[in-house]
Image (tube, rainbow, N blue to C red):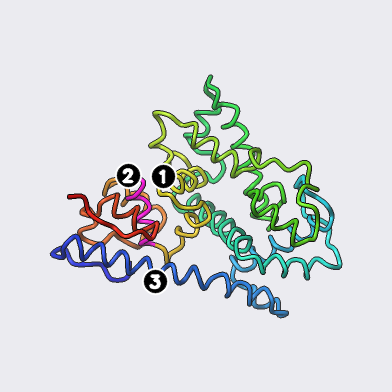
């Protein structure tokens, strides 16, 4: 956070500071979609010097090519270009949820690579998923499929690809409608077999080891993001976007809402933003306050 409260400030002051900081961060996210859309609409490709913008642009072009080619199965390899590809990509960019999803995927891939380079956290294989894949439990199959799916995601990220079958159902339907096709034309589509579907199934199936899913070092970034979204009551895309620098307060509140204590929250934040620190007095912030703030509900302390 830019301005940390002093150690003498009250819990109410810390909470207000976090709410104010989160509101500023939310404004940045709200503006991001329109900024991305304006950049994508501009004819000068020199505007795409920023890595995230370039990746979003590349993913939407790839998605457009796959739609035009009828590639609902999301085969490996960049789709063949099409004369209407640019026009369809811009139409897809006009869908805020789809644009935000592409932005979140770009940020997730960049963060995964940064964590591997900076902290040695494998971007494809995590201890938790690898252990479950090697276990003699019903979760082994899901974990094994998840390892393969995560490896594919990283290849797609590096190639700036966005296969149709990796979209959540709602976004798959939006993409098909944007094309003007019957939503049911993609008969090979199966949301539960997508990477996000496998992540959701994996997180939901964890039992006594569920707390490890909220450790990036143990679970890896992909599982961590899904587990944090589930535990803090946010969408996964919003949770991934909270990993960006402007969203430090939202991320801190999400970790608290998920039940992490001061030490665990600080540990995860140091991995993601090593140059930022929690404000003094954060230990007084309650998990129910954090959850209410994230949901936009009014907070009424018990008693």
Q: Main secondary structure of the magenta part?
A: helix
Of residues 183 and 146, the one drawn nearer to the viewer in this rendering: 183
- Which image quadrant is residue 143 in? top right
Q: Residues within 10 Å of mark 2 (few under 14, many from 20)?
A: many
Q: Which mark is residue 24?
A: 3
**Residue 45 in the image: above or below residue 81:** below
Query: Which secondary structure lies at badge 1?
Result: helix
Relative to residue 149, is residue 258 drawn left or right? left
Chain part drawn in magenta: 248-259
Mark before the other along the chain sequence, 3 or 2? 3
- Which image quadrant is residue 151 in? top right
Gap in angstroms between the C-alphas marked 3 and 2: 24 Å
Q: Residues within 10 Å of mark 1 (few under 14, many from 20)?
A: some
Residue 14 x/y as whole percent: 23, 63
Query: Which secondary structure lies at badge 2?
Result: loop
* Count of number-bearing discs: 3
Residue 109 x/y as whole percent: 57, 54
The answer, for residue 75, to whether it is visible in the render is no
- Which image quadrant is residue 208 in? top left
Relative to residue 17, is residue 174 drawn left or right? right
């Amino acid at each position: 956070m830019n301005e940390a409260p002093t150690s003498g400030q009250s819990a109410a002051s810390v909470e207000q500071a976090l709410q104010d900081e989160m509101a500023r961060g939310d404004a940045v996210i709200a503006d991001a979609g329109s900024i991305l859309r304006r950049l994508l609409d501009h004819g000068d490709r020199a505007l795409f010097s920023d890595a995230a913008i370039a990746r979003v642009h590349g993913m939407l072009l790839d998605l457009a090519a796959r739609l035009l080619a009828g590639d609902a199965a999301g085969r490996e390899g960049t789709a063949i270009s099409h004369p209407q590809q640019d026009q369809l990509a811009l139409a897809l960019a006009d869908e805020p949820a789809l644009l935000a999803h592409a932005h979140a995927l770009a940020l997730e891939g960049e963060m995964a690579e940064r964590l591997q380079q900076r902290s040695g956290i494998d971007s494809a294989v995590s201890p938790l998923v690898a252990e479950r894949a090697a276990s003699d439990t019903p979760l082994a199959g899901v974990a094994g499929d998840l390892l393969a799916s995560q490896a594919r995601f990283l290849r797609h990220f590096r190639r700036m690809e966005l296969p149709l079958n990796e979209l959540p159902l709602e976004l798959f339907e939006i993409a098909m409608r944007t094309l003007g096709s019957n939503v049911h034309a993609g008969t090979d589509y199966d949301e539960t077999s997508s990477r996000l579907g496998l992540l959701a199934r994996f997180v939901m199936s964890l039992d006594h080891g569920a707390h490890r899913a909220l450790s990036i070092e143990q679970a890896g970034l992909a599982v961590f993001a899904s587990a944090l979204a589930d535990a803090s009551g946010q969408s996964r895309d919003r949770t991934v976007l909270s990993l960006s620098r402007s969203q430090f307060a939202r991320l801190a509140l999400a970790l608290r809402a998920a039940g992490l204590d001061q030490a665990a929250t600080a540990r995860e934040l140091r991995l993601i933003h090593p140059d930022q620190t929690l404000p003094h007095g954060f230990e007084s912030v309650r998990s129910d306050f954090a959850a209410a703030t994230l949901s936009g509900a009014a907070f009424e302390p018990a008693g």
